[in-house]
Image: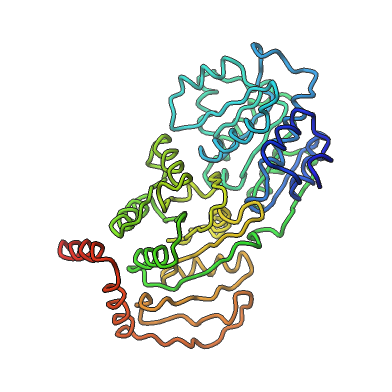
Amino acid sequence: MSVDAAGFSTELLKAVKACGYTNLTPIQQQAIPLIRSGCDLLASAQTGTGKTAAFCLPLLDLLMKSASQKKANNRAIRALILSPTRELAAQILENIKQYSQFMDLSCAVICGGKNMGPQIKVLKSGVDILVATPGRLIEHINARSVDLSHVKHLVLDEADRMLDMGFLTDIQLLMQNVKQKHQTLMFSATFSNKVKTLAKQLLHTPKTIEVSAQNSTAGKIKQQVYWVSETRKHELLSELIGVKNWQQVLVFAGTKESADLLAKELKLDGIKCAVCHGDKNQGARNKAIEKFTKGEVRVLVATDVAARGLDIPNLPYVVNFHLPFLAEDYIHRIGRTGRAGKKGMAISLVSPKDEQFLDNIEELIGRKFERIIYPGYAMDSSLPEIYEGTNTPKLKKSRYKATQEHNQMLARKQEKNKPSNIRREKAKRRKKR
């Protein structure tokens, strides 16, 4: 469906075209008419299919056409968008600014990691659309620096993630402050039982949209699993980046500590990288993401704080250095690549200790992965059986019988072929140990 046929106002249509949009995605085609009709909505679609525009565009249209629009010096918050993370909140705000560039509408974001003083000043000046993380918004409510009594449109983006992060109580408290009769929209990449339960509490006779199969991954993302010893994961990652000449790689680590350690290892191997996790302040996280986006660093090592809300155009590679504890988070991680119908590659480095997590992921998405054994890196005594194909659960016996001695020999050869400065650095590290 063409954006010209969507019936947007002249100002909104001009902005949408300036953003390079020509056609609406499936989630946008279904959601926009329903939101315009004023009904509550529960919507699910794959990550990267345009959910943000699906709720932002009709809301902007409704706010512009609203007869109750007030002058700039007397604005009240009429649309509230809740986001689980700072990164996603910042991304939503940026999108709204692009879509409303030709409109007389004000928007702002409030989230943790920043001083409340400037945020209070912005709120006092008047805001039509507020994007916020639940925790920081509660702080502003307690400080009586925000008024939600005029909110007519409430959006919960990535609702399942907010519940996973323990925001249920905050959401319920916020709902008590949105007293006026309003429209509630819940958007998410997955529908968990917790989301459905919350929807029953918050939504009134909602319409439901599920554009793609629940817990499915984007079709243009190529997914691979490498079977590797836990102690040699970082070496395999360096090898893959170097040999295959990957230039922009988002790597997910399991913890903040492991992310920092991995970044140090990659730097010792001569690979420029940055780190993004919860212990970094917002400025440092933004700087790391900016460097990665501009290509100043080759690798961004992140925890799940970046699994949602990180929108890097044409990101080619995502690597799961550690598999996520929750299988659903795998979908969000790899959803950072292959966005808007583009191709992408998702690689998971799996050791014997990760097998249960991999089994959970395979069960969730209904797919079995072939275990790829990269010569020299499967140092464990017991190797897995290799799946016959990537889309069948049928097993066949492994054709690859690797012994520890053979792998060690290959590893020594590969070590000799590495640049001398890397060998010297690794030799120094071995001596220290």
Residue 154 spot, x, y in % from top left: 68, 32
Residue 83 spot, x, y in % from top left: 58, 38
- On the question of residue 312 being in view, the answer is yes
Judge from the rendering whether residue 44 lies leftward or rightward of residue 273; answer left or right. right
Residue 79 spot, x, y in % from top left: 68, 28
Quadrant position of residue 129: top right
- Judge whether 404 appears above or below 128 on screen: below
- On the question of residue 301 being in view, the answer is no
Q: How is the image coloured?
A: rainbow
Judge from the rendering whether residue 85 lies leftward or rightward of residue 211; answer left or right. left
Query: Which residue occupies the foreground of this view, 160 or 127?
Result: 127
What residue sits 42% from the left and 66% below the top?
240
Q: Quadrant of the C terminus?
A: bottom left
Quadrant position of residue 424: bottom left
Judge from the rendering whether residue 104 lies leftward or rightward of residue 33; answer left or right. left
Residue 378 spot, x, y in % from top left: 38, 77
Query: Which residue occupies the foreground of this view, 81 or 404?
Result: 404
Total marks placed: 0
| Residue positioned most to the left | 431
What residue sits 57% from the left and 52% below the top?
314
What residue sits 43% from the left and 61% below the top?
321
- Judge whether 160 appears above or below 223 on screen: above
Quadrant position of residue 367: bottom right
What residue sits 60% from the left and 79% below the top?
389
